[in-house]
Image: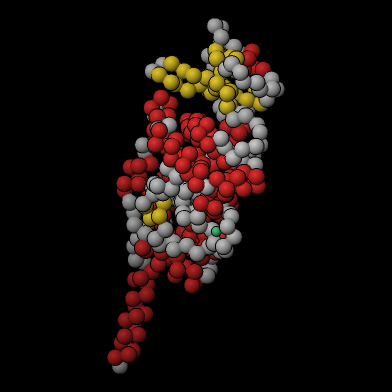
Amino acid sequence: MTLTRLALTALCLSLPITGLAKEKHPGMDVLIAEVAAGDRARAAEVRQLLQSAEYQPAIIEAMTRPAEGKPWFVYRPIFMTEARIAGGAEYFEKNRELLTKIQAEQGVPAEYVVAIVGVETFYGRIMGKWKVLDALTTLGLYYPPRAPYFRGELIRFLNLPSERDIDLDLAHVQGSYAGAMGLGQFMPTSFVKWAVDQNQDGRIDLWNSADDALASVANYLRDHGWTENAPVTVPMIPGPGARRLRDTGLDPIFPLSQLVEWGYQPVDGVVVAPDQPSNLLSLEVADGEFAHFAIFANFRVITRYNRSPMYAMAVHDLAQAIRERTGGVGQ
Ligand SMILES: [Ca+2]
């Protein structure tokens, strides 16, 4: 046997062994087959990416203690700080021209777009230092409680460059521990569906382009049903016989007149049509003490960004504070 044949034989013998090699991540081979769909070059590409991904136990830990577990009176002060309000007003002024254009095009008030970016990333100061590839691999392949969701996001992420024709370095792009990206913290599915190239330079850059990032947030809210010139939420004052309700959810399924019938009145000076679809939200403002709010369809839209009602209320409060300082884009 010549040396070449010997080498060849060794190569052939080694093939099945390679095939049986332990996967670097559980379920990796099945995932690669799913993404590549028979395309061998693509399979090799995806395999190389996933081989470079690292399981991060700290991400699993972070998933189990979200800020939403806190009561409202602890949650709200995290976001309603002077630094975040002043930072929002400053960011608004810096981007006033752009925000005016986006509000005119999308019909979403600029202060809500800025407030979302303020709550998500402190106007781009904290966009996340995790490798998105590590985050989504960890949550998609090692975290059974949310695996179906995050595995789907991982697949979306792997397909991002082809789906949106964007130039992204998937092995190094950074985001939150949950894999959210850029100023508005878009998950890959949101990136695919709602990110826009506002400045029309041929690329979508949600990290460095305020144009693209802010327009994408506005586009997300508009597409989820934001209604121009409609209310978001109004404080309600309970009368003496006000009914204590169990959680009625976030959907605007009652006319405002129903909330009035239950014994709650809009705070002085606020006029809302009695047939305005609404719901009642109660948030704990001190230990055992609650404030009540009528929430409307636009409030529900904000919860599409993050399902927590406290998140939506923090965005609303921050938006109002930014509007007070800047006057909004003006009408
Ligand atoms: Ca762009």
**Residue 17 % position (x, y):** 34, 71
Q: Residue at x 52, y 31 (%)?
A: 324
Residue toward you, 157 or 127: 127
Instruction: Tell which of 11 and 101 is nearer to you.
Output: 101
- Where is residue 90? Give x, y as percent: 46, 42
Where is residue 314? Give x, y as percent: 48, 32
Quick one: quadrant of the C terminus? Answer: top right
Number of dots carrying numbers:
0
Q: Is residue 31 above or below residue 280?
A: below
Q: Is residue 71 left or right of residue 320?
A: left
Does residue 147 appear anywhere in the picture? Answer: no
Residue shown at 65%/17% (left/top)?
A: 258
User: Is residue 259 among what the camera can see?
Assistant: yes
Residue furthest toward the top?
240
Residue drawn at x 55%, y 12% as measured from the top left:
238
Q: Quadrant of ligand 1?
A: bottom right
Q: Quadrant of the N terminus?
A: bottom left
Horizontal side of 138 relative to 38 (left or right) equals left
Instruction: Locate residue 225, reporting x and y percent.
Output: 64, 39
Q: Nearer the viewer, residue 73 or 163?
A: 73
The part of the image, by quadrant, that contains residue 169 is bottom left
Q: Residue at x 57, y 63 (%)?
A: 202
> Quarter of the image holding residue 170?
bottom left
Considering only vertical position in the picture, is 201 above or below 2?
A: above
Please give left or right for residue 300 compared with residue 132 in the image: right
Q: How is the image coloured?
A: secondary structure
